[in-house]
Structure formats: C-alpha cells, structure tokens
Image: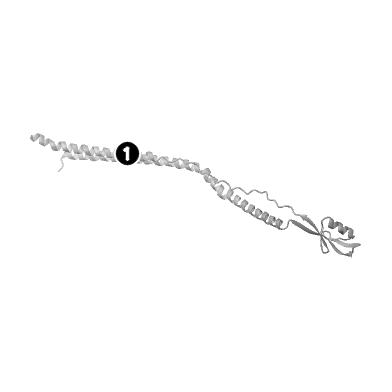
Amino acid sequence: MATAYQKRMMLRKQSDLTRIAEQYKKNIEAMTGQYQSEFAAYQKQRDELMAPYEAAVKQYREVQMPQYESAAAAYRQRLENFNNSLSDYEANPEQRQAVFQIVGGSPAAWQVKNLSTGKVGQMPSSAIDDLRSQGYEQDGSTFYKVTTRAVPKFNEKAPVAPAAPTAPQLPEFDQEKFEQQRAQLQTSYQREVGERKGARLAAVSRRTSRPLLKDA
C-alpha cells in the first residue's frame, strides 16, 4: 500500500505531466493558429496575383481566340478563291468578248448589230477589215474583242494567333518553419516528460537505498 509521501509524489508527478501536456497542447494550438493565419494570407496574396492572369485567360479563350479563328477561316477562304482565280487565269489568260455581229446586208453595206447596245447599223467591208486589224477576232458572223486578263493578286497577310497569357511566378508558402517548430515543440515535450520520469526514478532509488544505510 502506498504511503502518504508516495501518494503526494504521484499526485505531483501527475500534476507536472498534466501541466506539461496542457502547455504542449497550447503551443501546438498556437502554432496551428499562426499557420492557418499565414496560409490564409498567402492564399489571398496568391489569388490577387492570379486574378489578372485568370482574367487574361478568360479574355484569350472567349474573345481573342474566337476572333482569330474567325479571321483565319475568312482568310483561308479568300486564299482559296485567289488560288481558284489564278488557276482559271493560267488556263485562260485572254478574254474574248462578243462585240459586233453581222446580221444581214452585203459587202458594200453590212448590217451590223452592236451586241452591247442592241442597235443595228451599216458598216462597209473596209470598216470590217479595220476591226480585224485592230485585233478583233471573227468567228463566223461575230466579232470578238480579245483582251489580256489582269493577273490575279493576293497581298493579304495571314492573321497572327494571339499569344497565350503567361502565368505569374507565385511565391512558395514557407511550410518548413512550421514543421521545424512542431518538431522543436515535440522534442521539448518529450524531454520534459523524460526529465520528470527520470527525477521520479531517482527519488524512488534514493528512498529504496536509505533503509540499507540505516541497517548498516
């Protein structure tokens, strides 16, 4: 059965261990509160840094890229039309336009219809010869004006895709100091608990050795 002294020592030990445990708990809670506070401040700073970037990304996705894609599609269509015109020009560099048509009469006074106005007039053979000398081609009773077509040109530049926004450099949250602080608190707690247990063992050892000294 434990003596009154042993009971007092046990109570004192329990009181010391309880105090150490409570202090350790308070220190951990204080550190946790500081961690949460600093992490919240870090998140706020990160959100502030990211806000312009996120707005730029939204503008890029919803406005700039659709505008570019629309402009690029229209450019490709115009380029295709130009290539078709160029192919047609290469196949037919000259253009023949029906201008006059002999509708009656004789070499002395041909009846000639102006195909652009629809009027009919007289034209002697000498005037018909002049048309041939001027480069008009005759195909049967119809005279054609032959002209060289203009070479198709395409001077447009392809639209340039907008540059994607660059994400900002975000600072790293310093979590290492809290890990070090937690380790220090835990080490201190374990040391104090060990010291209390060591002191108790030493006290028990002293009490056990005293009767032997008296018997000696």
Residue 207 drawn at (x, y percent):
15, 37
- Coloring scheme used: one colour
Q: Residue at x 40, y 42 (%)?
A: 36
On the picture, is 128 further left or further right than 71? right
In the image, 63 versus 113, the foreground residue is: 113
Where does the image place residue 12, in percent across and percent down from the top left?
22, 38
Which residue is most to the bottom? 104
Looking at the image, residue 213 sits to the left or right of residue 85; the answer is left
Task: Judge from the rendering whether residue 54 lies leftward or rightward of residue 181; answer left or right.
Answer: right
The answer, for residue 102, to whether it is visible in the render is: yes
> From the image, which quarter does the N terminus lie in?
top left
Which residue is found at the position 20% from the left and 38% from the top?
200
Report the residue at 19% width, 37% height from top: 202
- Say above or below: 71 vs 42: below
Q: Within 10 Å of the Cα at label 1, are there few (<14), some (14-19), or many (20+) other Cα atoms?
A: some
Question: Mark 1: which amino acid?
Answer: Leu
Q: Quadrant of the C terminus?
A: top left
Q: Quadrant of residue 3?
A: top left
Q: Is residue 26 visible?
A: no
Coordinates of residue 33 in the picture (x, y in percent)? 38, 41
> Residue 155: image x %, image y %?
67, 48
Q: Please state the total of marks drawn on the protein image.
A: 1
For this view, does 7 lie left or right of residue 161?
A: left
Residue placed furthest toward the left: 216
Q: Is residue 70 above or below residue 194?
A: below
43 and 103: which is toward the camera: 103
Residue under pointer 1: 185
Please identify the residue farthest to the right as the structure is shown: 108
